[in-house]
Amino acid sequence: MNLTSLKKITLTALAGVPAMAFAQTAPYTIQGKIGNYNAPAKVYVEYRDKDKKLVVDSAVLHEGNFKFTGQVGNTPINAYILVNTKGSGMNASEDYHSVYLEPGTINVSTDDKVADAVISGTKTNNDNQKLRLAKKPVNDAYEALEAKRKTATPDQLSALNAEEKKIDDLDAQLSKKFIQENPDSYVSLNALESYAYSADYVDIAPLYNGLSAAIKATEAGKKFGERLPKLKAVALGATAPEFAEADTAGKMVSLSSFRGKYVLIDFWASWCGPCRGENPNVVKAYKAYKDKNFTILGVSLDRQNAKDKWLAAIHQDGLTWNHVSDLKFWDSKVAALYAVRAIPQNFLVDPKGKIIGKNLRGEDLQNKLAEIFGKI
C-alpha cells in the first residue's frame, strides 16, 4: 500500500467501523472468484466488531473461488478483502479491496487482482462501486503521482505536491457530487468524511444536513453530526481556538503568545509521508516571510514512544520554527480541538487570531502569503 493511497483511505477506514445493531442481525455471504488460484493461496476478510476488536476470517482459494458467511447488523461495516497467493499469512498480503459487510449476498468478481474487483450485490456495495467508477480518473492520477515520487529529487517534490493538490480538488468535487445525488447512501457518509478534510464548514454542513434521516441516525452519522460544532469553530473567519502544549524541551507554548503575528498552525508527524513531502514547501515559505510578521507553529501527531523520531524529523527537514506535541498520535488534544482527522493539514491565523486560510499546500501557500505580504 503506498503512502498516498494510505492517506486517502485513512478517513474512510476510521469512519467505516461504527457500532452495529447487534440486537437484530441477518446473514451475509461474500462469494466470488479471484483469478484461478489454488492452495496455498488464501483470501482474508478483516474488520472490527462492536468492541473495535479485530476480526479475521480466511479461506483457501479453489480455482479462484471462495465463500464467507456470517451475521451482521443493519448498519454496514467497512471491511477489507485481502489476498496472499503464497499462503504466508494475512500480514504478507499482496492485494486488498474494501467491502461493506451488510445483509445479503456480496459478489466479488475479478480476473486477477482483488484491487481491481467489481464488488456488487447489495445496496451499499453497489453504491460504492458507482463511486469507485466515478473516481477512477482520480485514483489513476494518484497512482501515477506516487510513481513519480519514487524517483523525484527534493527539488521536484514541491511541484509534485502542487500536482497532488489538483487531484485532491477533483476528488473533492466528485465526492460532493456523489453525496448530493445519493443522500440515502451510507457511502455518502463515508465520502463526506473524506470531503471534510479539505472543505470548510460552510460547504460541509449543507451536505450533512442533506443526508437522509436514516443515514444521520447511524452511529457514524450521529458522530459526524456531533463534530459539526468543532468544524464550525475552525471555519474560515472564526477565531482560532486557544491551546497550550509542550514544545520539544517540555516548555508550554500557547497559540495566544503569537498574537500580533500571522501564524501557520501546521499539523504533521514524522511518520507521515505526504507531510514530509510538503515540508520543503513550508520551509520555503518560512524563509521567505519569517521577517515579515509571519511564523509557523508545528503541531505533531507523533507517538509517545517516538519523541526521538519527531526531533530527528525536525532536524532532518530543517523545520526551524516552534514545535509542540502531546505525543498522543491520533488522540492529540489539539488535533481534536481543530477537528483534524488527516494530515498534513494547516490553518493560517491573522494577527487578530482569525482563521484566514486552511489546507494551504504547494503553490496555494506561497500564493496566499504573497497576497498578504507581497511577492518576495
Image (cartoon, rainbow, N blue to C red):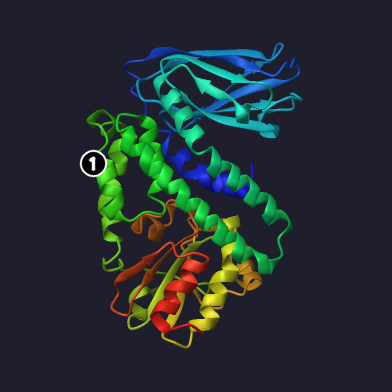
At 46% from the left edge and 75% from the top edge, which residue is drawn? 296
Residue in front for this viewpoint, 49 or 35 = 35
Q: Is residue 36 above or below residue 82?
A: above
Q: Position of residue 24 (x, y in %)?
A: 32, 15
> Can residue 73 be seen at all in this image of the molecule?
yes
For badge 1, the amino acid type reads: Asn
Residue 276: quadrant of the picture: bottom right
Q: Is residue 168 above or below residue 153?
A: above
Q: Dot 1 corresponds to which residue?
A: 209
Residue 350: quadrant of the picture: bottom left
Residue 317: quadrant of the picture: bottom right
Residue most extreme to the bottom:
291
Q: Is residue 345 left or right of residue 225?
A: right
Identify the secondary structure beneath mark 1: helix
At 49% from the left edge and 56% from the top edge, which residue is drawn? 343
Residue in front for this viewpoint, 236 or 40 = 236
At 74% from the left edge and 27% from the top edge, which residue is drawn? 88
Residue in front for this viewpoint, 223 or 201 = 201
Which part of the image, by quadrant, shows the N terminus? top right
> Can residue 251 be seen at all in this image of the molecule?
no
Q: Position of residue 357 (x, y in %)?
A: 37, 67
Q: Position of residue 158 (x, y in %)?
A: 60, 66
